[in-house]
Image (cartoon, rainbow, N blue to C red):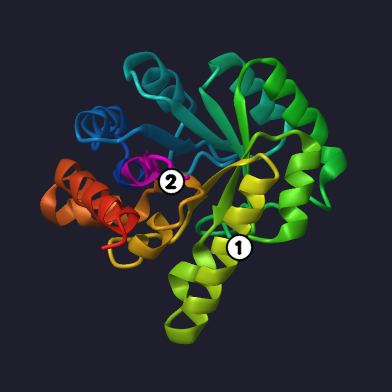
Amino acid sequence: MTHTLRLGVNIDHVATLRNARGGRHPDPLRAARVAAQSGADGLTIHLREDRRHIRDDDLEVIKREVDLPLNLEMAATADMLAIALAARPHAACLVPEKREERTTEGGLDAARLNAQLAPVVRTLSEAGIRVSLFIEPEARQLAAARALGAPVVELHTGAYGEAEGEARARELARIRQAARDGAALGLEVHAGHGLNFENVGPIAAIAELRELNIGHALIGEAVFVGLGEAIRAMRAAMDKGRAGQ
């Protein structure tokens, strides 16, 4: 069965641009509103420990002012758990986080971190927040997510985005298999990281995927064509891929 494929727009790098100069411009709230008007099905923001882009007040105002499901990417720490419980976003995606990385590097090792993740997953779920785990497209990680009780996984597509030729074909096959395996386990399967206008089509064609979360490519293209047009173009590329064109 082929499901409708949702687009989650990550607006972190609007905040990156703002923070480069200080002040309020460009405003992530304005970006969130444009996304809502341009076909986004949800918003994604990552509140990092060092607040390098999204800040606490961004989370508060976007949650309050924009009527789209909000997906909060967060590390599985006590501080972030407290923030999530106070903000009550629609979803919380648990991701690995290293202070020195430029962006999230690889998926969460859910199999190894079971003891750390279990109470966080349980507490968020009990608060009515949909929990997802950002993982590598591997069977052991899918099984670990299922055992933890997370209803959603987001497959890390970074290796696919960076690969070319036969290497990209191999990564695509891994993602396809993981999407099938995840769906067979009863998980809702999403994907994200490194997706752009050129490579999104084959990923969008994977019938088991329910949502793609895309940010950097959209914000980069927005410099030239505007954020609304970039989102509409990505939506069209996803729909084309989903239709097998």
Magenta span of residues: 1-16
Question: Can residue 60 be seen at all in this image of the molecule?
Answer: yes
- Quadrant position of residue 173: bottom right
For this view, does 179 lie left or right of residue 54? right
- Residue 14 within the segment the image draws in magenta: yes
Helix, strand or loop at label 1? It is helix
- What residue do we see at 71% from left, 51% from top? 142
Nearer-the-camera pick, 114 or 97: 114
- Amino acid type of the residue tagged 2 in the rendering: Thr
Task: Point out the tag, 1 or 2, that comes first from the N-terminus.
Answer: 2
The tag on residue 177 is 1
Q: Residue furthest left?
A: 225
- What residue do we see at 54% from left, 17% from top? 87
Q: Quadrant of the C terminus?
A: bottom left
Q: Are marks 1 and 2 in contact (CB under 8 Å)?
A: no
- What residue do we see at 39% from left, 59% from top? 195
Q: Position of residue 229 (x, y in %)?
A: 14, 46
Q: Which residue is mark 2?
A: 2
- Residue 152 within the segment the image draws in magenta: no
Q: Position of residue 149 (x, y in %)?
A: 75, 33
Task: Answer few, some or many: residues within 10 Å of disc 2's Cα (few below 14, many 20 plus, some between 14 and 19).
Answer: few
The tag on residue 41 is none
- Quadrant position of residue 171: bottom right
Above or below for 185 versus 65: below
Q: Position of residue 152 (x, y in %)?
A: 61, 38
Nearer-the-camera pick, 168 or 116: 168
Question: Can residue 219 be seen at all in this image of the molecule?
Answer: no
- Quadrant position of residue 4: top left
Q: Residue furthest front?
A: 1
- Amino acid type of the residue tagged 1 in the rendering: Gln
Helix, strand or loop at label 2? It is loop
